[in-house]
């Protein structure tokens, strides 16, 4: 019997048990109407467990730190680090809030535009009156 090239996906239309529902602040993110809805989510636990990445280790980065400054604003700490690697210079801005970190990287070729936009935002924040609460 010849092998057919079509592939079929079998979908279980019943909702997963609650322990598989991703939650954020106790609210469920899956919605089921009971009419054959299917949950497709990247937030579901992996069937392969929490094993660490088994691929090739990352090569050590060749980054030189040129300058670094830290500023505390309310409960947030921002670290501005000017770095250089073989591909060029960049500014790494890291926000740390209670141990949770988020980072953005701005290539040095965009720093003037970034500064210009930031200056406009500072000016607008000072000129636009705050809404009464």
Image (cartoon, grey):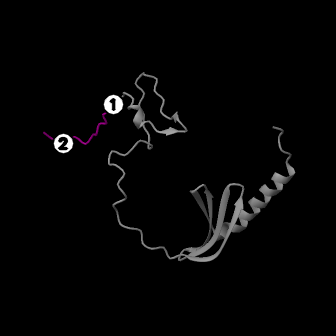
Residue tagged 1: 12
Q: Relative to residue 18, is residue 101 drawn left or right?
A: right
**Relative to 49, is 55 above or below?**
below
Question: Which type of secondary structure does the marked residue at label 2 adopt?
Answer: loop
Query: Which mark, residue 80?
Result: none
> Would you say residue 9 sits in the magenta stretch?
yes
Q: Give the spatial CA distance, label 1 vs label 2.
A: 25 Å
Q: Residue at x 42, y 32 (%)?
A: 18
Sooner in the amino-acid sequence: mark 1 or mark 2 = 2
- Tag 1–tag 2 contact (CB < 8 Å): no
Residue range in magenta is: 1-10
Q: Position of residue 88 (x, y in %)?
A: 58, 75
Q: Looking at the image, which is closer to me, 132 or 88?
A: 132
Decide whether the magenta segment is chiefly helix, strand or loop: loop
Q: Position of residue 102 (x, y in %)?
A: 58, 57
Q: Residue at x 78, y 55 (%)?
A: 121
Q: Locate residue 9 relative to residue 109 in the image: left or right.
A: left
> Would you say residue 61 sits in the magenta stretch?
no
Is 43 situated left or right of 82 in this image?
left
Residue at image position (83%, 40%) is 131
Q: Position of residue 128 (x, y in %)?
A: 85, 48
Q: Which residue is mark 2?
A: 3
Q: Quadrant of the N terminus?
A: top left
């Amino acid at each position: 019997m010849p092998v057919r090239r079509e592939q079929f996906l079998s979908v279980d239309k019943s909702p997963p048990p609650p322990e598989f529902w991703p939650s954020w602040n106790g609210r469920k993110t899956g919605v089921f109407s009971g009419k054959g809805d299917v949950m497709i989510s990247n937030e579901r636990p992996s069937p392969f467990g929490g094993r660490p990445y088994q691929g090739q280790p990352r090569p050590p980065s060749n980054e030189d730190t040129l300058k670094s400054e830290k500023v505390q604003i309310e409960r947030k700490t921002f670290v501005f680090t000017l770095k250089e690697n073989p591909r060029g210079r960049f500014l790494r801005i890291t926000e740390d809030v209670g141990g949770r970190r988020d980072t953005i990287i701005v290539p040095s070729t965009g720093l003037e535009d970034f500064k210009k936009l930031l200056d406009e935002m500072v000016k607008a924040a000072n000129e636009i009156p705050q809404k009464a609460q």
